[in-house]
Amino acid sequence: MPENLGIEEAFSAVEKASALLNVPCSRDKLWPILKLFTPFEGGFIFSATAGERGGDLDLTIQVPRSITDPYAHALSNDLIPQTNHPVASLLADLQKGCSVEECLIDVGVVGGFNKIYVHFPRDMQTVAQLVDLPSMPHALADNAGYFARHGLDGVAMIAIDYRHHTTNLYFPTPGGLEPDTIRSLIRELGLPEPEEELVESARQTFRVYFTLGWDSSTIERISFARILDLPLIRSREPEFTRFMTGTPYTYDGDRFSISIVKWAPEGAWFNGGSYYQFGPLQREVFRKFLK
């Protein structure tokens, strides 16, 4: 792995990954955003959504240590609009309330700046602790019993989506989840009974996460992330397989990829991510999966 990935090398890799999805990659549009978050000191991940929901390539990029407030950095460089919404305060509340070990940004090659991920796996926060944050959506408190019933308490990462005014809470599940737990999690959200094949894939999840907003107590989406289930993706999304098996990467050994099955009222779908470059913390988190 390079000590610090160069912007030219990174952009070339993004072009290759975009081509696998037939996503247009504009140098004029993307280069200035990439430049604002150099040097690329750690994680650099390609991800996309399969099927009709797709149409973009998302880049998850570790924020360099020199940028202590990535939200202010994005705001001052006109990547996101100014807002009085509580979403604007959540990063600061998390930085005050726990030991944040790294932040990452999410940028769509077409759509532009979307999210900031706040990662604190060594100082996981309980639901009760997070509920006390002033800017946390009330939906978390309203669903505290739901999480407790299913044995979910420690949160290792939170994603803050500034464009959609939502947040994702990531609960590690290192031993996976039992099929009955998966069915119950989905059923209690009022979603249709899941297909058995999808449940069997989701039971190997290492992280389950939930999408919450500020306007409703409803959990908007549930997602199960696992090491790539290539047979399932290939059988259901053959065109997406080209992306999942063809993205460039910088490290020795096999490409490391994950697949995610998501459920929402409008149905189930797949997302996938391939690691182009690892940061030290990501290597630690995924060490048991890496060869």
Image (tube, grey):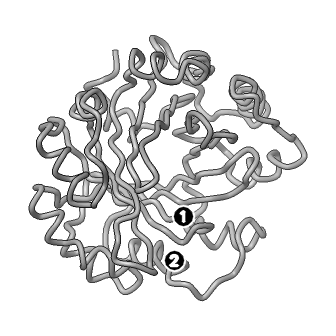
- The numbered mark at residue 227 is none
Which of the two labelled residues, at mark 1 and mark 2, occupies the earlier sequence position?
A: 2
> As rendered, which of 121 and 191 lies closer to the eye?
191
Residue furthest to the right in view is 28
Q: Secondary structure at mark 1?
A: strand
Q: Is residue 229 left or right of residue 11?
A: left
Residue 72 in the image, given as x and y percentages of width and height: 63, 73
Report how far apart the C-alphas of labels 1 and 2 lie in the structure. Answer: 8 Å
Q: Is residue 36 left or right of residue 130?
A: right
The amino acid beneath tag 1 is Asp
Residue to which mark 2 is pinned: 87
Q: On the image, which quarter does residue 19 sit in?
A: top right
Q: Residue at x 53, y 40 (%)?
A: 42
Q: Is residue 185 above or below residue 231?
A: below
Q: Are marks 1 and 2 in contact (CB under 8 Å)?
A: yes
Q: Is residue 163 left or right of residue 91?
A: right
Q: Is residue 139 above or below residue 284?
A: below
Q: Residue at x 71, y 27 (%)?
A: 13
> As rendered, which of 224 and 65 lies closer to the eye?
224
The amino acid beneath tag 2 is Val
Residue to which mark 1 is pinned: 161
Residue 126 in the image, given as x and y percentages of width and height: 19, 66
Q: On the image, which quarter does residue 284 sit in?
A: top left
